[in-house]
Structure formats: structure tokens, C-alpha cells
Image (cartoon, rainbow, N blue to C red):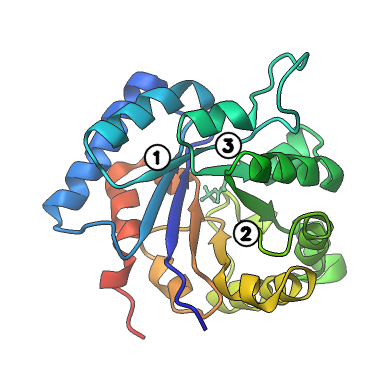
């Protein structure tokens, strides 16, 4: 069994212009430096709005901050007449490592379905980006089908169409936990993340299942991250609201200091 390097990912959503983005990344870097925490055992990635990416890239690369960065969405197409879309090719040219795909806000507000999410995942892989595929159940789904059925179905639909050795990240984000202050319990997160890992083993391969990082997302804070990270199938977190507070985000990144096996 491989050791999976934990990933703490900050989804900024539609917050911070490019000037604030630069100041914010500097603040996270200084806070971690003051705490003498080098992001080596934990991978840290930020997901700014499209218009900030070039500025964030320049800062991270010129100051060798050691953070990864990515986009919050991409087009299923590579180029052409798609007004408002952003190609994976352009994101790759900016050295984005990751791209979030199928966040529940896009599934709900932009009516993205499994077919489109699959096409976007394929586009990301075509351009060497690692897709962070978001899945999760609403509270209605939870009542009707339990916790795993919907996220498992959403992931299965995407995995049916990609190569067995694809590098992906999966984010399990119960929709009822996003921005609500009511996180899932670590045991609930573990159950669903284990079910998702089994789907990866069946649909792709056992080796890919072993190496794929599965994140939990939904009201993660510095006070609860350690309890999620003790779970064997939870390999990190996708953090929304708490990723907009540099000190809080830096505390989340330092979770290994608080995890007691
Ligand atoms: C998210 O939107 O991906 C998320 C997990 O948000 P929050 O941490 O605010 O619940």
C-alpha cells in the first residue's frame, strides 16, 4: 500500500481580486514560515478565480513558495467558438496543476450533469491537469438513498470514460455540509471515502485506487481537520470558507501537528 501525500486545497470561489490574492498568498506563506512549518509532508494548493491565476503563479514561482495552484473550472472544449469558456490548454500554460470539476455549486447553479463533468474531466487529462472531481449528496439524497449512493454513482459515471492509470483527486463533499457549519462526522466521511475508493478499484484499477487522494470537504476548520485526517481513507480536505482566512487556513495545513494516530 502506498503512502498518499495529504492535500489541503483552498477553494476561494468568487472571492479576492488579483491584488488581494497576491497579498493573501504572501500572508499564508509568512504564517507558515513563522510557525516553522514547511509544506513538504502536506501538499498545499489554492484555487483562485481565473483572473487571479497569473498573479498567483508569478508569486508562487518567483518566491519558490512550494504551493500548488489550480482553477475552479474549465471548458470541455480545447478552443474555438465558446464565449466565456477557459481552455485546459490555457490553464496548463499557466502551470496549473489542478482543476476543480463538478463542484456542487456548478452542478446546482449551472446545471452541470455527469455527462458534462465527464467531458471536462477528459479535457483536464488531455492537457496534463489533475482533475479534482467533486461528488456528494444533498440532504434529500441522504434521506432517500443514504450517504454513499449518489456520490458513488456520480464518480462511477466519470470513471467509466477515463484511462485506468489516470491521475485524479476525488473530493467527497456532502452538499448539506458545504458552508453550513455542520460538517459530516469523521466516521461518515470515512465510510463514503472508502466506498469511493472501492469504485476507483473496480472502475480503474486497484493500483490507481491505492494512489488516488480522496478529500473530504464541507465545513472543515482548524478545529476538526485532525479528526478527519485520522481516518484511513481521507487524504486531505477541500476547504471553502476557512480557506479565505490566512491564519485559519495555515492552521488547517499544519494538521499533522495535531493528529495523534
Ligand atoms: C466547498 O465549497 O468546497 C466547501 C467545502 O466549502 P466550506 O468549507 O465553506 O463548507
> Is residue 83 positioned above or below 74 on the image?
above
Label number found at residue 72:
3
Name the residue at 80% across, 57% down.
154
Upstream in sequence: badge 2 or badge 3:
3
Mark 3 / mark 1, whichever is N-terminal: 3
Query: Does 28 sit left or right of 205 as displayed?
Result: left
Q: Is residue 22 visible?
A: yes
Residue 191 left/right relative to 238: right
Q: Position of residue 15 (x, y in %)?
A: 47, 29
Q: Disc 2, ligand 1: is the CB inside 8 Å?
A: no
The answer to whether marks 3 and 1 mark residues whose Cβ atoms lie closer than 8 Å is no
Screen quadrant of the C terminus: bottom left
Q: Is residue 140 above or below residue 111?
A: below
Label 3 vs label 1, nearer the camera: 3
Q: Earlier in the sequence, mark 2 or mark 1?
A: 2
149 relative position to 253: left or right: right
Q: Secondary structure at mark 3?
A: loop
Label 1 belongs to which residue? 244
- Which element carries disc 2, helix, strand or loop? strand
Whole-angstrom CA distance, mark 3 to mark 1, is 15 Å
Quarter of the view holding residue 116: top right
Residue at 82%, 69% (x, y): give it.
149
Callouts 2 and 1 close, C-beta under 8 Å: no
Q: Nearer the viewer, residue 36 or 249?
A: 36
Q: Position of residue 220 (x, y in %)?
A: 47, 58
Quarter-wise, where is residue 195 in the image? bottom right
Residue to which mark 2 is pinned? 170
**Nearest to the observer: residue 111 or residue 37:** 37
Amino acid at each position: 500500500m502506498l503512502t498518499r501525500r495529504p492535500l489541503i486545497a483552498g477553494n476561494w470561489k468568487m472571492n479576492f481580486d488579483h491584488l488581494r490574492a497576491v497579498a493573501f498568498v504572501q500572508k499564508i506563506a509568512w504564517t507558515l514560515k513563522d510557525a516553522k512549518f514547511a509544506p513538504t509532508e502536506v501538499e498545499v494548493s489554492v484555487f483562485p478565480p481565473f483572473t487571479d491565476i497569473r498573479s498567483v503563479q508569478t508569486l508562487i514561482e518567483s518566491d519558490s513558495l512550494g504551493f500548488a495552484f489550480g482553477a475552479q473550472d474549465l471548458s470541455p472544449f480545447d478552443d474555438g467558438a465558446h464565449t466565456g469558456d477557459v481552455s485546459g490548454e490555457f490553464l496548463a500554460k499557466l502551470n496549473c496543476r489542478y482543476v476543480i470539476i463538478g463542484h456542487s455549486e456548478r452542478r446546482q447553479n449551472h446545471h452541470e450533469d455527469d455527462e458534462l463533468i465527464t467531458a471536462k474531466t477528459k479535457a483536464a487529462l488531455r492537457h496534463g491537469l489533475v482533475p479534482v472531481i467533486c461528488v456528494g449528496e444533498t440532504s434529500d439524497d441522504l434521506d432517500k438513498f443514504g450517504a454513499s449512493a449518489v456520490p458513488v454513482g456520480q464518480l462511477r459515471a466519470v470513471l467509466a470514460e477515463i484511462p485506468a492509470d489516470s491521475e485524479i483527486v476525488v473530493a467527497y463533499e456532502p452538499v448539506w455540509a458545504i458552508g453550513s457549519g455542520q460538517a459530516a462526522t469523521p466516521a461518515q466521511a470515512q465510510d463514503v471515502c472508502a466506498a469511493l475508493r472501492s469504485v476507483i478499484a473496480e472502475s480503474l484499477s486497484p493500483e490507481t485506487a491505492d494512489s488516488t487522494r480522496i478529500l473530504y470537504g464541507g465545513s472543515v476548520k482548524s478545529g476538526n481537520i485532525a479528526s478527519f485526517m485520522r481516518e484511513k481513507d481521507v487524504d486531505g480536505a477541500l476547504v471553502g470558507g476557512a480557506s479565505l482566512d490566512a491564519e485559519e487556513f495555515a492552521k488547517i495545513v499544519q494538521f499533522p501537528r495535531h493528529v495523534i494516530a
